Structure formats: structure tokens, C-alpha cells
Amino acid sequence: MTRTAQSPDKKPPLLPAWYSAVGILLLGLFVVFNLAYRLGAGGIQIGGANTSFNREHDSELYKIDDTRAFLVHGGFVSIVKYKSGLPPFRPLCGRCDLDGSIFNMASFQKGDWFYSRYPELDGPDAYNLKTGEIVKLDVPRTQKDVDPASVPFYVEHGFTFDAALAVTPERIAREHEDLSLINESCVVFNAAFVLLFGTMVLIGVPMLIVGLRRRRSA
């Protein structure tokens, strides 16, 4: 007498096959985009379409202390406040986020003082890194460029404009610790992924509930 083993009934899937396929595809694209970004790519080509990260707008951040840093952008150096970034962009896109500006025109440094080459422009003209003093000079604009070496406050403090005192991105990068800044180029495409993942969850929860009920009644 021969016995035929009966296979147990196959349980219905918790989620539709198309939903799982879309989720896997979305997760794969998320990993590919972030790996390419971390490796320094300027964008990704998918199916003949080019997707740019727009990294030309990125900035770099270099530590002064636990709350202040040098921001390097487009060849210019400024002094800013920074803080820990918010999830999910921290640590996905970096660790630090900007928390306000202190001094936008850090062109030269003498001792603890950073000062601007253009005191006639609006905004602070000098900043003392040690004391936190911010100086805004009343230098009127004229038809000709203002000679910064003739500004009384600069003369009084011995501010000069020698190349050795220039605050350059190269010097800042050489002398200060690099902080991982959360740049907008990373936030933009990851925000799109967060929105898509959130939509998948909203769609998936009702389908998961239905799938569980089907399994119980099967």
C-alpha cells in the first residue's frame, strides 16, 4: 500500500507581489543613489536620463569649537554656528547642520581678529574669535573703492592685508578639523526617498491588515 504525502495548503501572501517588487526596487535605488553620492559622483544616469546632484552648491565645514565653525563656499570663508543634524539626514547626509551666521566676510586674520577686505559693505566688519566681539563699522560708500588700510579701526588694531594673513579655503582645510556637513544636494534626493517610503508605508499598512485576515481565515 502506497501513501501519498499531502503538502500543506499554501498560505496567501501578506502583501501583493507587485508591492514587494516596488519596495525592493525603491530600496535598491535608495542604496545606489547614496553610494554614488558618498563616492563623490556628480549624478547618476538611469535609462538614458541624467540625474544631477547639483553639488556645485555644496559647502564645507571646519571646526573652531563645539558651537562655531568655518564655512567654506565658493572660495569664500565665513564663520557660522553649527549643531547636530536631525534624523534621517543625520547620519545619512552628514553629522552637522548650520545654526546661524556670525561673520560672513572672514578675509584676513591677525591674532584673534578676523576682518573683512570690504568694510564699506553692510554687515559686521571684524570678529574676535576669542572674545566673541563683533564690530560693525560706519564706513560710507563712495564712487571709488574704499581703501580698507585707511579705516581708523583697522589702523588702530594694526590690520594689514598681506597675503600671509589671508584666510583661504586651503588654509582653513589644512589647519582645522573637517566636520561632516549636511548639504542640500544630499537632502533633496533623500527627502524624495523619505516621501516615497512614507507613501509605501501608508499604502502597505491596510494591505498588511487584509493579508493577515486572509491568512487567519484560510
Image: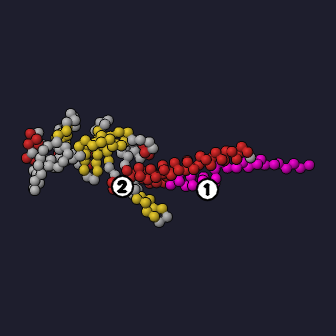
- The earlier-in-sequence mark between 2 and 1 is 1
Toward the right, the furthest residue is 1
Toward the top, the furthest residue is 131
Q: Is residue 174 above or below residue 65?
A: below
**Left/right of residue 17 with respect to residue 176 in the rendered view:** right
The residue depicted at 14 percent of the width and 49 percent of the height is 120
Q: Which label number is shown at residue 18? A: 1
Q: Secondary structure at mark 2?
A: helix
Residue segment shown in magenta = 1-29
Question: Label 1 sits on what residue type?
Answer: Trp
Q: Callout 1: few (<14), some (14-19), or many (20+) C-alpha neighbours within 10 Å?
A: few
The answer to whether one can see residue 162 in this image is no
Question: Label 2 sits on what residue type?
Answer: Arg
Q: Is mark 2 in CB contact (under 8 Å) with mark 1?
A: no
Q: Which label number is shown at residue 55? A: 2
Q: CA distance from mark 2 to mark 1?
A: 35 Å
Q: Callout 2: few (<14), some (14-19), or many (20+) C-alpha neighbours within 10 Å?
A: some
